[in-house]
Amino acid sequence: MTTPKRSRAQALLRLAIRVAPRERADWLEAMAAEIDHVPDASVQRFAIGCLTTAVRTRIASPAFILASTHLTLVFGALAWAALNLWFAGRMSSADAAGPEMFGYSIAAAFAFGALATARFGFRAVLGLGAPLLAVLGLSALAIKLLLPYSAVNALYFALIVEDIATLLLALGIAFAIPRLVAIRQATGQ
């Protein structure tokens, strides 16, 4: 007869089997066979231990790391686009056409980048981010070196610096994470 504790433990073990990466399937099948021999007093701790190990293994798996990084870049770009849309809307209510258009164009660039990243992955971040970074960097230099100081120029410069920082973060993630995962796989970690 199956007790409620044992039923919950078996449900936790089934969840662990679904969560774990495929390469751990043999280990979990062995744990599923072993659960019948675990005393009722310890069966839930046993199942929770199996589930915890399965979750940790999944989170550390290269496929999970790459997929979660990919999603982070896509949703990060969409969030940055949304913030720029919000900024552009604020500028439109203040009758500031230049900053408004800048906000809309940066929002469009990041939204396009998010869609390209969703479709093409890390290559899109590197392929689109680097040229945009160069254009923004040259724009910031031009504002600082060629234009006289004004509040509007200072605003543009600050906005460009924010966009450069965001792009550098995205480029760093898109460049580093796949390489770190490849190194971990090559070294067997």
Image: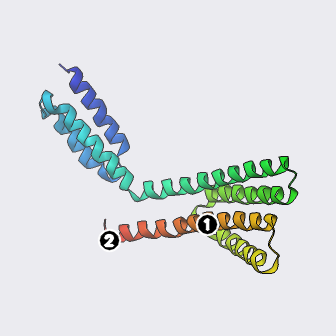
Q: Dot 2 corresponds to which residue? A: 187
The quadrant where residue 10 appears = top left
Q: Please state the total of marks drawn on the protein image.
A: 2
- Residue 141 at x, y = what percent? 73, 78
Residue occupying the point 61% across, 63% down:
166
* Amino acid type shown at disc 1: Ala
Residue occupying the point 60% across, 67% down:
123
Q: How far apart are marks 2 and 1 (CA)?
A: 32 Å
Determine whether label 2 and label 1 are within 8 Å by CB: no
The quadrant where residue 186 appears = bottom left
Task: Give the side of residue 149 with respect to residue 41, left or right.
Answer: right
- Residue 71 at x, y = what percent? 55, 53
Q: Nearer the viewer, mark 2 or mark 1?
A: 1
The residue closer to the viewer here, 77 or 59, is: 77
Sort mark 1 into few (<14), some (14-19) or many (20+) by Cα contacts within 10 Å: few
Location of the N terminus by quadrant is top left
In primary-sequence order, the first of circles 2 and 1 is 1
What's the mark number on residue 165?
1
* Amino acid type shown at disc 2: Thr
The quadrant where residue 137 appears = bottom right
Q: Is mark 2 on a helix, strand or loop?
A: helix
Task: Give the side of residue 99 with respect to residue 25, left or right.
Answer: right
Residue occupying the point 22% across, 24% down:
5
Location of the C terminus by quadrant is bottom left
What's the mark number on residue 15?
none
Above/below status of 79 relative to 154: above
The residue closer to the viewer here, 71 or 91, is: 91
- Residue 154 at x, y = what percent? 75, 67
Above/below status of 36 relative to 72: above
- Residue 155 at x, y = what percent? 75, 63
Residue occupying the point 69% across, 58% down:
110
Sort mark 2 into few (<14), some (14-19) or many (20+) by Cα contacts within 10 Å: few
